[in-house]
Image: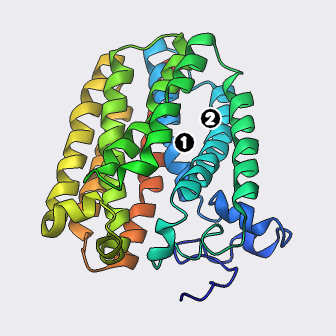
Amino acid sequence: MLERPAASALPDAVRDHWADRLAPAALRPYLRLARIERPIGWWLLLLPCWWSAALAAIAGGVPWPNPLHCLLFLIGAVAMRGAGCSYNDIVDRDLDTRVERTRGRPLPSGQVSLKGALAFLALQGLVGLVVLLQFNGFAIATGFASLGIVALYPFMKRFFWMPQIVLGLAFAWGALMGWAAAFGSLSLPALLLYAGSIAWVVGYDTIYALQDIEDDEIAGIKSSARFFGDQVRLGVGICYVLTLAFMVPAFAWAGAGTVAFAGLGLFALHLAWQVIRIDRNDGAGALRLFRSNRDAGLILFAAMTLDTVLRAF
């Protein structure tokens, strides 16, 4: 019988995070349930939102992405990433006991009860709803349309060899939201950006899944890392090529300038660096590569924003 893990930070959490040092002890398991001590998740959910807002600013000829929209996307990303993780852990609470990296999570370890997790999920969902209602009607409807995909994702790893595709459909949804919030509709650049963002998510989450590949095999959990096997570098490389194949025409169709394309070039170099550095047997290195996508995404967003500023003035 497995011993109950201590109520401490999980292996892939940020060390000495404020949630583990400063938050009241009673709240820490709930913060871990929302993955607050692993901020990379909400960053990766947020970045397609910001890219989309910046692409809309480029297409609309305004000097910068809408600051209020960007702030709302930030709050919404933190809340909805937490809600998604809480929901995922509720669904996966039995599977998580079979994987070394996840058996210390609040639900399988007994730090949070199922009723407590459900209540916390509802609270985070309410915050997300309040944020969503600040946008126009079309953006609100677009946001609600993502919920079905989010609900489906935790079950996919049980029978679908590429659950990362479904994760991509959910995590890249923000690529539609920034455009929808700006224009009250969707156009080809937003759809192309969404497609590119999906491929990006599949690529980086394949890298992330390398940490669990041995335990996943034992537990019967399917993942793109297991699917690609020894060809994981090629698989991730194809995902990243598709990312750029969709993003380049998205930028061109929106009327992006030289600075935005230069940022896309730097983004491409970063993705190529990740592919070169992939080691199927290095879980710690896989986590570092996965986390580096935040920096790659911020570089792209900064270049897109600078492009709008320079062209406006």
- Asked if residue 145 is positioned above or below residue 101 in the image, the reply reads above
Q: Residue 292 at what x, y percent from top left?
A: 43, 61
Residue at 19 percent of width and 45 percent of height: 241
Q: Tag count in the figure? A: 2
- Asked if residue 218 is positioned above or below residue 41 in the image, the reply reads below
Hey, what amino acid is under mark 2? Phe
- Asked if residue 5 is positioned above or below residue 66 in the image, the reply reads below
Q: Residue 273 at what x, y percent from top left?
A: 27, 62
Q: Provide the residue designation for mark 1.
A: 46
Are circles 2 and 1 on residues that touch, CB within 8 Å?
Answer: yes
**As rendered, which of 163 and 272 lies closer to the eye?**
163
Q: Residue 190 at what x, y percent from top left?
A: 39, 22
Is residue 36 visible in the rendered image? The answer is no
2 or 1: tag closer to the N-terminus: 1
Graded by Cα atoms within 10 Å as few (under 14), some (14 to 19) or many (20 or more), the crowding at tag 1 reads many
Q: Provide the residue designation for mark 2.
A: 73
Judged from the image, the secondary structure of the residue bearing numbered disc 1 is helix
Judged from the image, the secondary structure of the residue bearing numbered disc 2 is helix
Give residue 253's quadrant in the image: top left
Query: Is residue 207 found left or right of 297 in the rendered image?
Result: left
Give residue 304's quadrant in the image: top left
Is residue 150 visible in the rendered image? The answer is yes
Furthest-front residue in view?
A: 1
Q: What is the spatial separation of the Cα atoms under label 2 and label 1, in whole angstroms?
A: 6 Å
Q: Residue 249 at what x, y percent from top left?
A: 25, 25
Residue at 48 percent of width and 10 percent of height: 185
- Asked if residue 199 is positioned above or below residue 11 in the image, the reply reads above
Residue at 66 percent of width and 29 percent of height: 67
Hey, what amino acid is under mark 1? Leu
